[in-house]
Amino acid sequence: MHVEQISVFIENKFGRLAEVTRILGDAGVNIRTLSLADTSDFGILRLIVDHTDHAKSALKERGFTVSKTEVVAVEIPDRPGGLADVLQALDEEGINVEYMYAFVERNAENAVMIFRFDETQKAIAALVARQFAVLPGERLYGM
């Protein structure tokens, strides 16, 4: 029930984000979702793509520092309080959310959030026990 994510460390300067996306496009890699966090000098671009290993090698060949991590995709009811319910369940189990970002799904009644937890297996077990849908990577890669 894990999802593979790549993290790309990029200089915070004009054109670097465009370069990353062009490299992926030229390699035939489709970006499913992304998140960008920055500091004054560097940024961390987190991506879920349809071909993780291919994306990683294409970026490394062009000199980018890339790592692969596992994150968790959770389907959340798209209604007021839907995200709060998930976060409350995690809080009750003492699970920390390191970061999260949204995954856009076409024509859906639910939202999908991508999470990185301090205790991934414990988080998955807590969510499943409370009947939240934890999605496999294969489902996201093909959307």
Image (cartoon, rainbow, N blue to C red):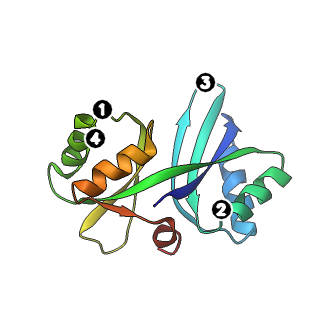
Residue 19 is situated, as x and y percent measured from the top left of the image, at 72, 52
Q: Is residue 124 visible?
A: yes
- Left or right: where 32 falls relative to 132: right
Number of the label disc, if any, that sits on residue 40: 3
**Looking at the picture, which amino acid does disc 3 mark?**
Ser
Q: Residue at x 37, y 33 (%)?
A: 96
- Dot placed on the residue nearer the N-terminal end, 2 or 3: 3
Residue beneath disc 1: 94
How far apart marks 3 and 1 lie (CA) works out to: 32 Å
How far apart marks 4 and 3 lie (CA) works out to: 32 Å
Residue 115 is situated, as x and y percent measured from the top left of the image, at 42, 47
How far apart marks 2 and 3 lie (CA) works out to: 28 Å
In the image, which is nearer the foreground, mark 4 or mark 3? 4
- Dot placed on the residue nearer the N-terminal end, 3 or 1: 3
**Looking at the picture, which amino acid does disc 4 mark?**
Leu
- Dot placed on the residue nearer the N-terminal end, 1 or 2: 2
- Left or right: where 61 falls relative to 15: right
Number of the label disc, if any, that sits on residue 37: none
In the image, which is nearer the foreground, mark 2 or mark 3? 2
**Looking at the picture, which amino acid does disc 2 mark?**
Thr
Number of the label disc, if any, that sits on residue 90: 4
**Looking at the picture, which amino acid does disc 1 mark?**
Gly
Secondary structure at badge 1 equals loop
For label 4, the crowd category at 10 Å Cα-Cα, with few meaning under 14, some 14 to 19 and many 20 or more, is some
Secondary structure at badge 2 equals helix
Which is nearer the eye, 130 or 85? 130
Residue beneath disc 2: 52
